Image (cartoon, helix red, strand yellow):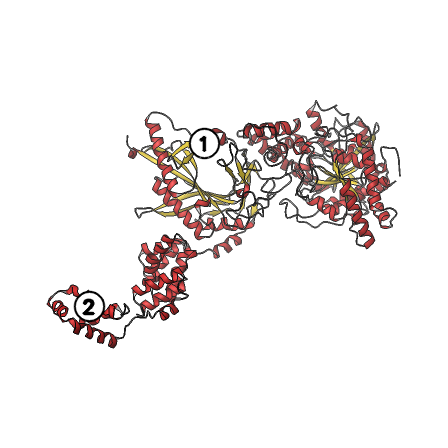
Amino acid sequence: MKHQQSITEMLTSLQRREYSCVELAEYFLNRIEESEELNAFITNDSENALTTAGKMDEAYAAGNAPPLAGIPVAHKDIFCTQGLKTTAGSHMLDNFIAPYTATMVEKLQIAGTVVLGKTNMDEFAMGSSNENSYYGPVKNPWSKTAVPGGSSGGSAAAVAAGLCAAATGTDTGGSIRQPAAMCGITGIKPTYGRISRWGMIAYASSLDQAGPLSRSAEDAALLLEVMAGFDPKDSTSLDEPVPNYSAILCNSIAGLRIGLCREYFRAGLDSNIELAIQEAIRVVESAGAKVTEISLPNTRHAIPAYYVIAPAEASANLSRYDGVRYGYRCENPADITDLYKRSRSEGLGKEVKQRIMVGSFVLSEGYYDAYYRKAQKIRRLIKNDFMEAFKQVDLILGPTTPSPAFEIGEKSADQISMYLQDIYTISSNLAGVPAGSIPVGFSDGLPVGLQIIGNYLDEARILNLAHRYQMETDWHQRTPGGDIL
Amino acid sequence: MSRSDWEIVIGLEIHVQLLTNSKIFSGASTHFGAEANTQACAIDLALPGVLPVLNKDVYRVAVALGLAIGAKINLRSVFDRKNYFYPDLPKGYQITQLTYPIVESGQVEILLPDGNAKVIGITRAHLEEDAGKSLHEDFHNRTGIDLNRAGIPLLEIVSEPDMRSADEAVAYAKYIHQLVTYLAVSDGNMSEGSLRFDSNVSIRRTSDTELGTRTETKNLNSFRFLERAINHEVDRQIGVLESGDKVKQETRLYDPVKDETRPMRSKETSNDYRYFPEPDLLPVEIEESYIEEIRQRMPELPREKASRFVADYALAQADADLLAASSQLGDYFEATVKISGDARLAANWVRVELLARLKTDNIDVTDVPVPASELGYVIARIKDGSISGKIAKTVFEALWQGEAGNAQSYIKQNGLVQVSDVVELESLIDAVITSNPKQVEQFKAGKTKLMGFFVGQIMMQTKGKANPQRVNKLLKSRLG
């Protein structure tokens, strides 16, 4: 079935005219319509999707189709798309039509992708379950009462349910990898600065990074090749050449040095997840990789450091949402103070407001040194831990999440428990190193993800290991409907 | 107690709008006077997802100014976010430099009105973006926001509290104004907001070593307002302290209509800006070679130029200072000297005639209708005796009004060349002497005032074209 094809297979089918781009787009648009209960999408852009698909059909006919011509994708609603609503999952931006397009989206458009719509997300990327959206929670395609993870929950659910060929997401503390793990798909957060942040609504500037969510490492490689690259409009963008990730996928992993971080295998890790991870490691070892134990001693400080730095940056990044120039404005403001207070109180959700308050607090006079400055120092220690580890190993493997997808509503009252979902993922954001998650099994019917962390700009090696693993196993081909290709 | 029992301590913060084509963090135009909100792009509007990119020109300009004030240029500087809410600040924070500014500790030497020189320390100068404008008057209980100004590059120059009077503060402000216009760092147009002053004023008893509580008066945009605001603040503070009260540390605004300062509404002042380093911009790292390159291309500064005028053209210091007051005026003067070959005459003409005319017509030397080459030509003709000084003035006026294409043809067409020929003049003199025997006798008898009469006669005969010096000389030798 078309939704089970890899991107490469779809491209072949399109080139051979087995079906047209328009047919392919229509196919997925129908599936989206039929899966509305998942609430994975905020906006469907069927009109433009079909127009683009038509153009790509012409391109195939003319023989000048770009590399991903006709591939249907969905974008997390955090990326500005010109002429289309871009909400960041928030009431505050429910009326915002972006007047420009994010660089990353533009690159995918130039490559010929067909944009089906914008996916649901935790408001302003703040959340680990997609329960913080103004547009309602997203359901996990594997269990309709479970969360898909967050904040890129909509994108992960869409890929897992076969509503698009691939989707984009953002990852600030784990928001690509954790939903990828919970939805049984492949997600990559590249090195900080690898993909341009121009047009990506900011949550925490020094941590945010875009990335692909797809059904395989092979698909991820194709997408990353297009998405990555220097952008002069983003001063934090890396001016480094983008490797041909696809060409490196099949490299042998014999001799690859794998590190298992002892701090990741402590109490609190779901036992089924631990088993699945250990099995995955055995597969990798049998392909010739060498496994050693390493330590990332400052792991336990990562979450507190993150929950100081991210809210601090967010508190400033979200100040622009004030009802003055665009976005939600309260009715009949009495004066500017009233306009600010009510527009922001009414337009922003609870979690967002909480993080703004925390962020303002840790930056405030008398507390800056004790909190923000201290957290940045811890950040350097965490980075140093990785640098030390990567002297001994090439990649670090471990679980992506401590537990599989939990029930909707289960953790919403327990914020700390929610925050602890990111315990394995958050360190890589603080250090800026790349990391991905691939499906490696199940825990009581819910997907389990294996996290692969690499050194700076070593996305190729992460994808290589992921692909070699996916050549030996079929977890990534399982679908919620129970089909296997 | 009188004013003399108190010592006044003043520090100035000067905000200079930098002359670059585009804004500090976006490509929008910085051109003054455009229709509201036509020069504010997505970045300036703080739309979701936008990012700042540093305009490298701005850096070059800041380094040039740093060099001109003998300051330390930091090879590494960092931008910070200064957080507060105001509708003309779209992001809800201003990007500025707090801990690691581009320029640190420098100093300038200013000339006080009494002729003495004084060194004023400069603590630092840092880059930041300007906010938009809030217009309160025209919108019926609402405020209009114009974001054209949002993002214009500013250099904030912070002085040490080294000034001890409003006069000193004004002298310092004027020097900085001259310096930034000299370096073409700013257009110096204060009515357009290119330069704004914040004055920090405190007073203490002359016997005290500790500084008193200071107040800040913001957004003064003329030297006159600066002087008045300072003096008003000093008097007010003296009044407060003498009545036994304490001066409250606060921010104030100057009202030019009432000529007084008043406190800003407390809502306008933010106590805690929650500064943190700007994560969207990298620290700026420059090399010594970059600084050196800028140093090589620095123009001559006002003091240097004036000294050179004294040395090269034998001008009096005061005249040299005046001619070097702006680099354009200095250049005009020198071009005139080059063409005319007479520095003294050129200095007089530029200093007196030209400056007067510029003032009455209210134009700047950059818009002067008489090119230096033309004025130089006219002066050269005075020097070689072709025309008199008086005729030269009419030629100059004609050039100014645009009635003359160029001096040479104008002089020729109107037959303005002086009669200097001795033979011709002597025959005219003979004629005048012969026809006015009575006056000749009276002159010889001692009525020397009659020289003017004889000169006048010659002038009449020649329709004003006789060379007056020569006529005088010849008459003297004839009449004795």
Q: Label 1, secondary structure: give it.
A: loop
**Residue placed most toward the observer, A448 or B126:** B126
Residue A100 figure quarter: top right
How far across and how far down the image is residue B276, in percent?
56, 36
- Residue A190 drawn above or below residue B57: above
Using the image, name the chain to which the residue with label 1 belongs.
Answer: B
Q: Name the residue under label 2.
A: B454
Residue at the spot of label 1: B264
Q: In this view, does A333 lie to the left or right of B256?
A: right
When asked about the image quadrant of residue A280, the answer is top right
Residue name at image x 33 percent, y 35 percent = B7
Disc 2 secondary structure class? helix
Residue B410 position (above or below residue A167): below
Asked whether, in this view, residue A165 is left or right of residue A412, the answer is: right
Q: Which amino acid does label 2 sit on?
A: Phe
Return the chain for callout 2.
B
Left or right of B139? Residue B421 is: left
For the N terminus of chain B, the image quarter is top left
Q: Which tag is nearer the camera, tag 1 or tag 2? A: 2
Q: Quadrant of the C terminus of chain B?
A: bottom left
> Which is nearer the eye, A260 or A331?
A331
Residue farthest along the front direction in this orientation: B435
Q: Residue B40 location, x and y as percent?
A: 57, 44
Position in image of residue B473 (x %, y %): 21, 70
Q: Is residue A223 at least partly visible in the picture?
A: yes
